[in-house]
Amino acid sequence: MINVGIVGVGCISGIYLKNLHEVFSGLHLVAVCDLIKERALNAQKEYNIPKVYDTMEELFADPEIDVVLNLTRPYQHYEVSKAALLAGKHVYSEKPLGADLEEGIELVRLAKEKGLLIGGAPDTFLGAGIQTCRKLIEDGLIGEVIGGRCVMASHGVESWHPDPDFYYQRGGGPLFDMGPYYITALINLLGGIKSVYGYSKTAYQTRLITAKPHEGEIIEVNTPTHIESFLTFDCGAVVSLLTSFDVYSTKQTNIELYGTKGTLYVPDPNWFGGTITFFNGETGKSEEYPLVFDYSENSRCLGLADIAKEIEGARASRTTSKQTFHVLEVMASVMKSAEIGTPVTLTSHFEREAPMDPTLPHGEL
Protein backbone atom coordinates (compact mmCIF):
# COMPACT_ATOMS: atom_id res chain seq x y z
CA MET A 1 0.00 0.00 0.00
CA ILE A 2 1.39 3.41 -1.06
CA ASN A 3 0.41 6.20 1.35
CA VAL A 4 -0.56 9.54 -0.22
CA GLY A 5 -0.66 13.10 1.11
CA ILE A 6 -2.43 15.83 -0.91
CA VAL A 7 -1.39 19.48 -1.02
CA GLY A 8 -4.14 21.63 -2.54
CA VAL A 9 -7.83 20.81 -2.26
CA GLY A 10 -9.22 23.06 -5.00
CA CYS A 11 -11.43 22.41 -8.04
CA ILE A 12 -9.48 19.50 -9.54
CA SER A 13 -9.15 17.64 -6.22
CA GLY A 14 -12.71 16.30 -6.23
CA ILE A 15 -12.18 13.67 -8.91
CA TYR A 16 -8.81 12.66 -7.41
CA LEU A 17 -10.41 12.15 -4.00
CA LYS A 18 -13.29 10.18 -5.47
CA ASN A 19 -11.08 7.87 -7.54
CA LEU A 20 -8.54 7.41 -4.74
CA HIS A 21 -11.30 5.99 -2.57
CA GLU A 22 -13.48 4.21 -5.12
CA VAL A 23 -11.31 2.98 -7.99
CA PHE A 24 -7.59 2.42 -7.50
CA SER A 25 -6.29 -0.30 -5.24
CA GLY A 26 -2.87 0.03 -3.65
CA LEU A 27 -3.27 3.73 -2.76
CA HIS A 28 -4.19 5.00 0.71
CA LEU A 29 -4.89 8.70 1.35
CA VAL A 30 -3.64 9.59 4.83
CA ALA A 31 -3.49 13.41 4.89
CA VAL A 32 -4.57 16.62 3.17
CA CYS A 33 -3.51 20.25 3.39
CA ASP A 34 -4.81 23.50 1.88
CA LEU A 35 -4.20 27.21 2.48
CA ILE A 36 -7.97 27.45 3.00
CA LYS A 37 -8.31 24.97 5.84
CA GLU A 38 -12.07 24.67 5.40
CA ARG A 39 -11.49 22.89 2.09
CA ALA A 40 -9.26 20.32 3.74
CA LEU A 41 -11.73 19.79 6.57
CA ASN A 42 -14.59 19.30 4.10
CA ALA A 43 -12.53 16.70 2.22
CA GLN A 44 -11.67 14.97 5.50
CA LYS A 45 -15.32 14.77 6.47
CA GLU A 46 -16.52 13.48 3.09
CA TYR A 47 -13.79 10.85 2.62
CA ASN A 48 -12.86 10.01 6.22
CA ILE A 49 -9.25 11.16 5.76
CA PRO A 50 -7.19 10.47 8.92
CA LYS A 51 -5.17 13.72 9.06
CA VAL A 52 -5.48 17.40 8.16
CA TYR A 53 -2.37 19.58 8.35
CA ASP A 54 -2.20 23.38 8.64
CA THR A 55 0.95 23.65 6.49
CA MET A 56 2.55 21.63 3.75
CA GLU A 57 5.74 21.43 5.79
CA GLU A 58 3.85 19.56 8.51
CA LEU A 59 2.46 17.17 5.90
CA PHE A 60 5.91 16.59 4.39
CA ALA A 61 7.27 15.74 7.84
CA ASP A 62 4.78 12.91 8.28
CA PRO A 63 6.85 9.69 8.09
CA GLU A 64 3.78 7.70 7.05
CA ILE A 65 3.48 9.48 3.67
CA ASP A 66 5.27 7.94 0.67
CA VAL A 67 4.16 10.26 -2.15
CA VAL A 68 2.84 13.82 -2.28
CA LEU A 69 0.04 14.62 -4.72
CA ASN A 70 0.62 18.26 -5.72
CA LEU A 71 -2.69 19.84 -6.80
CA THR A 72 -1.70 23.49 -6.38
CA ARG A 73 -1.79 26.22 -9.03
CA PRO A 74 0.71 25.93 -11.91
CA TYR A 75 3.05 28.67 -10.68
CA GLN A 76 3.17 26.95 -7.28
CA HIS A 77 4.09 23.50 -8.59
CA TYR A 78 7.84 24.10 -8.38
CA GLU A 79 7.88 25.39 -4.80
CA VAL A 80 5.64 22.61 -3.47
CA SER A 81 7.32 19.79 -5.40
CA LYS A 82 10.81 20.96 -4.43
CA ALA A 83 9.91 21.13 -0.76
CA ALA A 84 8.40 17.65 -0.90
CA LEU A 85 11.50 16.23 -2.57
CA LEU A 86 13.77 17.89 -0.01
CA ALA A 87 11.65 16.22 2.67
CA GLY A 88 12.30 12.83 1.07
CA LYS A 89 8.90 12.30 -0.57
CA HIS A 90 8.11 11.06 -4.05
CA VAL A 91 5.95 13.55 -5.98
CA TYR A 92 3.08 13.35 -8.45
CA SER A 93 2.06 16.81 -9.66
CA GLU A 94 -0.73 18.25 -11.72
CA LYS A 95 0.50 19.66 -15.02
CA PRO A 96 2.80 21.29 -15.88
CA LEU A 97 5.94 20.00 -14.15
CA GLY A 98 7.10 23.61 -13.71
CA ALA A 99 6.21 27.09 -14.89
CA ASP A 100 9.37 27.25 -17.02
CA LEU A 101 12.17 24.98 -18.20
CA GLU A 102 14.59 26.03 -15.46
CA GLU A 103 12.14 24.88 -12.78
CA GLY A 104 11.76 21.53 -14.52
CA ILE A 105 15.51 21.04 -14.78
CA GLU A 106 15.97 21.75 -11.07
CA LEU A 107 13.16 19.38 -10.00
CA VAL A 108 14.48 16.53 -12.14
CA ARG A 109 18.02 17.11 -10.85
CA LEU A 110 16.87 17.16 -7.24
CA ALA A 111 14.75 14.01 -7.61
CA LYS A 112 17.69 12.16 -9.14
CA GLU A 113 20.02 13.39 -6.40
CA LYS A 114 17.60 12.20 -3.70
CA GLY A 115 16.79 8.89 -5.39
CA LEU A 116 13.12 9.86 -5.65
CA LEU A 117 10.50 9.83 -8.39
CA ILE A 118 8.75 12.93 -9.67
CA GLY A 119 6.03 12.57 -12.24
CA GLY A 120 2.69 13.97 -13.05
CA ALA A 121 -0.34 14.74 -15.14
CA PRO A 122 -1.87 14.49 -17.55
CA ASP A 123 -2.78 10.82 -17.30
CA THR A 124 -5.58 10.96 -19.88
CA PHE A 125 -3.24 9.27 -22.40
CA LEU A 126 -3.60 6.11 -20.29
CA GLY A 127 -7.33 6.06 -20.99
CA ALA A 128 -9.24 3.99 -23.52
CA GLY A 129 -9.24 6.65 -26.24
CA ILE A 130 -5.53 7.33 -26.72
CA GLN A 131 -4.51 3.74 -25.89
CA THR A 132 -6.86 2.41 -28.58
CA CYS A 133 -5.54 4.95 -31.10
CA ARG A 134 -1.97 3.89 -30.29
CA LYS A 135 -2.86 0.27 -31.02
CA LEU A 136 -4.58 1.20 -34.30
CA ILE A 137 -1.51 3.16 -35.44
CA GLU A 138 0.89 0.39 -34.39
CA ASP A 139 -1.29 -2.15 -36.19
CA GLY A 140 -0.81 -0.15 -39.41
CA LEU A 141 -4.38 1.10 -39.84
CA ILE A 142 -3.42 4.55 -41.13
CA GLY A 143 -0.09 3.57 -42.70
CA GLU A 144 2.94 5.79 -42.24
CA VAL A 145 2.06 8.93 -40.30
CA ILE A 146 2.86 11.98 -42.41
CA GLY A 147 1.66 14.70 -40.08
CA GLY A 148 -1.31 16.12 -38.30
CA ARG A 149 -3.23 19.08 -37.01
CA CYS A 150 -4.37 19.79 -33.43
CA VAL A 151 -6.57 22.64 -32.20
CA MET A 152 -7.51 23.69 -28.68
CA ALA A 153 -9.21 27.03 -29.16
CA SER A 154 -11.76 28.87 -27.04
CA HIS A 155 -12.38 32.40 -25.83
CA GLY A 156 -10.89 31.84 -22.41
CA VAL A 157 -12.05 30.53 -19.04
CA GLU A 158 -13.26 33.68 -17.28
CA SER A 159 -16.88 33.04 -18.25
CA TRP A 160 -17.09 29.80 -16.25
CA HIS A 161 -14.11 29.24 -13.93
CA PRO A 162 -14.64 30.42 -10.31
CA ASP A 163 -11.03 31.66 -9.98
CA PRO A 164 -9.61 32.24 -13.48
CA ASP A 165 -6.79 34.74 -12.81
CA PHE A 166 -3.96 32.19 -12.75
CA TYR A 167 -4.77 31.08 -16.30
CA TYR A 168 -3.39 34.43 -17.52
CA GLN A 169 -0.24 34.53 -15.40
CA ARG A 170 3.18 32.89 -15.50
CA GLY A 171 2.80 29.14 -15.91
CA GLY A 172 -0.65 29.61 -17.39
CA GLY A 173 -1.89 30.51 -20.86
CA PRO A 174 -3.43 28.04 -23.30
CA LEU A 175 -0.18 26.25 -24.14
CA PHE A 176 0.93 25.52 -20.57
CA ASP A 177 -2.64 24.85 -19.44
CA MET A 178 -4.00 22.65 -22.24
CA GLY A 179 -0.86 21.90 -24.24
CA PRO A 180 0.21 19.07 -21.90
CA TYR A 181 -2.89 17.05 -22.85
CA TYR A 182 -2.21 17.33 -26.57
CA ILE A 183 1.58 16.96 -26.47
CA THR A 184 1.42 14.01 -24.06
CA ALA A 185 -1.13 12.28 -26.29
CA LEU A 186 0.95 12.95 -29.39
CA ILE A 187 4.24 11.63 -28.00
CA ASN A 188 2.48 8.48 -26.83
CA LEU A 189 1.02 8.02 -30.31
CA LEU A 190 4.06 9.01 -32.39
CA GLY A 191 7.12 9.03 -30.12
CA GLY A 192 9.42 11.86 -29.08
CA ILE A 193 9.71 15.37 -30.53
CA LYS A 194 13.07 16.61 -31.78
CA SER A 195 12.41 20.26 -32.73
CA VAL A 196 9.71 22.93 -32.64
CA TYR A 197 8.82 26.22 -34.30
CA GLY A 198 6.49 28.64 -32.54
CA TYR A 199 4.54 31.87 -32.98
CA SER A 200 2.65 33.72 -30.26
CA LYS A 201 0.59 36.83 -29.59
CA THR A 202 -1.78 38.30 -27.02
CA ALA A 203 -5.05 39.62 -28.41
CA TYR A 204 -6.39 41.20 -25.21
CA GLN A 205 -4.34 42.88 -22.49
CA THR A 206 -7.12 42.51 -19.92
CA ARG A 207 -9.99 40.09 -19.31
CA LEU A 208 -13.38 40.73 -17.70
CA ILE A 209 -14.52 37.96 -15.35
CA THR A 210 -18.19 37.10 -15.87
CA ALA A 211 -18.32 34.04 -13.57
CA LYS A 212 -19.06 34.16 -9.87
CA PRO A 213 -17.66 34.81 -7.28
CA HIS A 214 -15.31 37.31 -9.03
CA GLU A 215 -17.83 38.62 -11.56
CA GLY A 216 -16.93 42.12 -12.77
CA GLU A 217 -13.25 41.95 -11.79
CA ILE A 218 -10.52 42.68 -14.37
CA ILE A 219 -7.61 40.31 -15.02
CA GLU A 220 -4.26 41.63 -16.22
CA VAL A 221 -2.96 39.28 -18.92
CA ASN A 222 0.74 38.47 -18.45
CA THR A 223 1.25 35.54 -20.80
CA PRO A 224 0.64 34.95 -24.54
CA THR A 225 -2.87 33.70 -25.27
CA HIS A 226 -2.62 32.60 -28.92
CA ILE A 227 0.20 30.19 -29.78
CA GLU A 228 0.73 28.34 -33.04
CA SER A 229 3.44 25.69 -33.08
CA PHE A 230 4.93 23.12 -35.42
CA LEU A 231 6.29 19.94 -33.85
CA THR A 232 8.76 17.72 -35.71
CA PHE A 233 8.86 14.17 -34.37
CA ASP A 234 11.73 11.70 -34.34
CA CYS A 235 9.69 9.54 -36.73
CA GLY A 236 9.64 12.38 -39.29
CA ALA A 237 6.02 13.46 -38.91
CA VAL A 238 5.26 17.18 -38.55
CA VAL A 239 2.19 18.16 -36.52
CA SER A 240 0.82 21.67 -36.04
CA LEU A 241 -0.70 22.61 -32.67
CA LEU A 242 -2.83 25.68 -32.07
CA THR A 243 -3.64 26.59 -28.47
CA SER A 244 -5.65 29.77 -27.97
CA PHE A 245 -7.85 31.66 -25.52
CA ASP A 246 -8.63 34.23 -28.24
CA VAL A 247 -10.90 32.26 -30.61
CA TYR A 248 -14.69 32.57 -30.52
CA SER A 249 -15.45 29.53 -32.67
CA THR A 250 -13.75 26.79 -34.70
CA LYS A 251 -14.88 23.65 -36.52
CA GLN A 252 -11.46 21.99 -36.28
CA THR A 253 -11.44 18.68 -34.41
CA ASN A 254 -9.11 18.06 -31.48
CA ILE A 255 -6.44 15.89 -33.14
CA GLU A 256 -6.25 14.77 -36.77
CA LEU A 257 -3.42 12.46 -37.83
CA TYR A 258 -2.71 12.07 -41.54
CA GLY A 259 -1.37 8.74 -42.73
CA THR A 260 -0.57 7.20 -46.10
CA LYS A 261 -3.78 5.12 -45.83
CA GLY A 262 -6.15 7.74 -44.44
CA THR A 263 -6.95 10.13 -41.61
CA LEU A 264 -7.41 9.20 -37.95
CA TYR A 265 -9.64 11.44 -35.85
CA VAL A 266 -8.35 11.11 -32.28
CA PRO A 267 -10.73 11.90 -29.38
CA ASP A 268 -10.27 14.90 -27.09
CA PRO A 269 -7.04 14.26 -25.10
CA ASN A 270 -8.46 16.18 -22.15
CA TRP A 271 -10.66 13.14 -21.49
CA PHE A 272 -10.13 9.41 -21.20
CA GLY A 273 -12.60 8.00 -23.72
CA GLY A 274 -14.31 9.48 -26.77
CA THR A 275 -15.15 8.55 -30.33
CA ILE A 276 -12.47 7.27 -32.73
CA THR A 277 -13.08 7.68 -36.46
CA PHE A 278 -10.90 6.64 -39.39
CA PHE A 279 -11.38 7.94 -42.92
CA ASN A 280 -10.14 5.22 -45.24
CA GLY A 281 -8.39 6.76 -48.24
CA GLU A 282 -8.79 3.59 -50.29
CA THR A 283 -12.55 3.20 -49.85
CA GLY A 284 -13.43 6.86 -49.36
CA LYS A 285 -15.52 5.93 -46.31
CA SER A 286 -15.37 6.76 -42.61
CA GLU A 287 -15.72 4.15 -39.88
CA GLU A 288 -15.89 4.35 -36.09
CA TYR A 289 -13.63 2.05 -34.08
CA PRO A 290 -14.57 0.67 -30.65
CA LEU A 291 -12.53 1.36 -27.55
CA VAL A 292 -10.58 -1.80 -26.66
CA PHE A 293 -8.92 -0.57 -23.46
CA ASP A 294 -10.22 0.23 -19.97
CA TYR A 295 -10.76 3.67 -18.40
CA SER A 296 -13.10 5.58 -20.70
CA GLU A 297 -14.66 7.50 -17.79
CA ASN A 298 -13.00 10.34 -15.84
CA SER A 299 -10.11 8.37 -14.32
CA ARG A 300 -7.86 11.12 -12.98
CA CYS A 301 -5.54 9.54 -10.41
CA LEU A 302 -4.74 6.78 -12.92
CA GLY A 303 -1.28 8.33 -13.36
CA LEU A 304 -0.67 8.33 -9.61
CA ALA A 305 -1.61 4.66 -9.49
CA ASP A 306 0.81 4.07 -12.36
CA ILE A 307 3.79 5.81 -10.73
CA ALA A 308 3.02 3.90 -7.52
CA LYS A 309 4.05 0.71 -9.31
CA GLU A 310 7.55 2.10 -9.83
CA ILE A 311 7.69 3.30 -6.22
CA GLU A 312 6.93 -0.31 -5.28
CA GLY A 313 9.71 -1.47 -7.60
CA ALA A 314 7.32 -3.45 -9.82
CA ARG A 315 8.08 -1.82 -13.18
CA ALA A 316 8.87 1.47 -14.93
CA SER A 317 6.10 4.07 -14.73
CA ARG A 318 4.61 5.79 -17.76
CA THR A 319 4.08 9.08 -15.90
CA THR A 320 7.50 9.99 -14.48
CA SER A 321 9.56 13.07 -15.37
CA LYS A 322 10.97 11.26 -18.42
CA GLN A 323 7.63 12.21 -19.96
CA THR A 324 6.61 15.35 -18.06
CA PHE A 325 10.01 17.00 -18.57
CA HIS A 326 9.93 16.28 -22.31
CA VAL A 327 6.49 17.88 -22.51
CA LEU A 328 7.68 20.90 -20.52
CA GLU A 329 10.71 21.32 -22.78
CA VAL A 330 8.47 21.16 -25.85
CA MET A 331 6.28 23.97 -24.50
CA ALA A 332 9.16 26.10 -23.26
CA SER A 333 10.93 25.67 -26.61
CA VAL A 334 7.80 26.74 -28.50
CA MET A 335 7.71 29.95 -26.46
CA LYS A 336 11.45 30.50 -26.97
CA SER A 337 11.08 29.93 -30.71
CA ALA A 338 8.28 32.50 -30.81
CA GLU A 339 10.62 35.02 -29.19
CA ILE A 340 13.71 34.43 -31.34
CA GLY A 341 11.93 33.61 -34.63
CA THR A 342 13.82 30.41 -35.40
CA PRO A 343 13.27 26.68 -34.71
CA VAL A 344 14.52 25.22 -31.44
CA THR A 345 16.06 21.75 -31.11
CA LEU A 346 15.19 19.84 -27.94
CA THR A 347 17.82 18.41 -25.59
CA SER A 348 15.63 15.69 -24.03
CA HIS A 349 14.73 12.44 -25.78
CA PHE A 350 11.52 10.52 -25.16
CA GLU A 351 10.93 6.80 -25.52
CA ARG A 352 7.44 5.45 -24.90
CA GLU A 353 6.83 2.92 -22.15
CA ALA A 354 4.65 -0.15 -22.73
CA PRO A 355 0.97 0.42 -23.49
CA MET A 356 -1.72 -0.31 -20.91
CA ASP A 357 -2.69 -3.92 -20.24
CA PRO A 358 -6.41 -4.33 -21.09
CA THR A 359 -6.63 -7.71 -19.32
CA LEU A 360 -6.13 -6.35 -15.78
CA PRO A 361 -9.11 -5.81 -13.47
CA HIS A 362 -10.46 -2.25 -13.27
CA GLY A 363 -8.46 -0.27 -10.70
CA GLU A 364 -5.36 -2.48 -10.87
CA LEU A 365 -2.22 -1.61 -12.85
Image: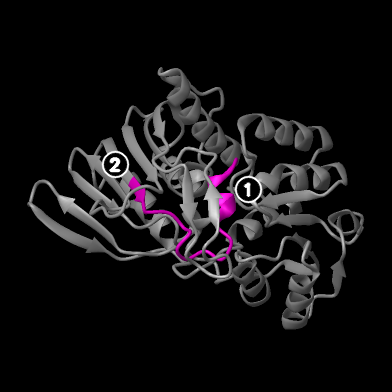
Residue type for callout 2: Arg
Residue 248 lies, in percent from the top left, at: 30, 54
Residue 85 lies, in percent from the top left, at: 81, 44
Residue 158: say if magenta.
Answer: yes
The front one of 65 and 330 is: 330
Label 1: state its secondary structure.
Answer: helix
| Residue 313 seen anywhere in this rendered image of the structure | no
Label 2: state its secondary structure.
Answer: strand
Q: CA distance from mark 2 to mark 1?
A: 26 Å
The boundaries of the magenta stretch are: 151-172
Q: Earlier in the sequence, mark 2 or mark 1?
A: 1
* Residue at 59% from the left image edge and 51% from the top image edge: 166
Residue type for callout 1: Pro
The image shows residue 147, relative to residue 245, as above or below, that is above
* Residue at 44% from the left image edge and 36% from the top image edge: 191
Residue 102 lies, in percent from the top left, at: 66, 29
Quarter containing the N terminus: bottom right
The front one of 52 and 191 is: 52
Q: Pointer 1: what residue?
A: 74
Q: Which mark is residue 149?
A: 2
The front one of 22 and 106 is: 106
Q: Residues within 10 Å of mark 2 (few under 14, many from 20)?
A: some
Question: Could you say which quadrant of the image residue 348 lies in?
Answer: top right
- Residue at the far left in the pictured view: 283
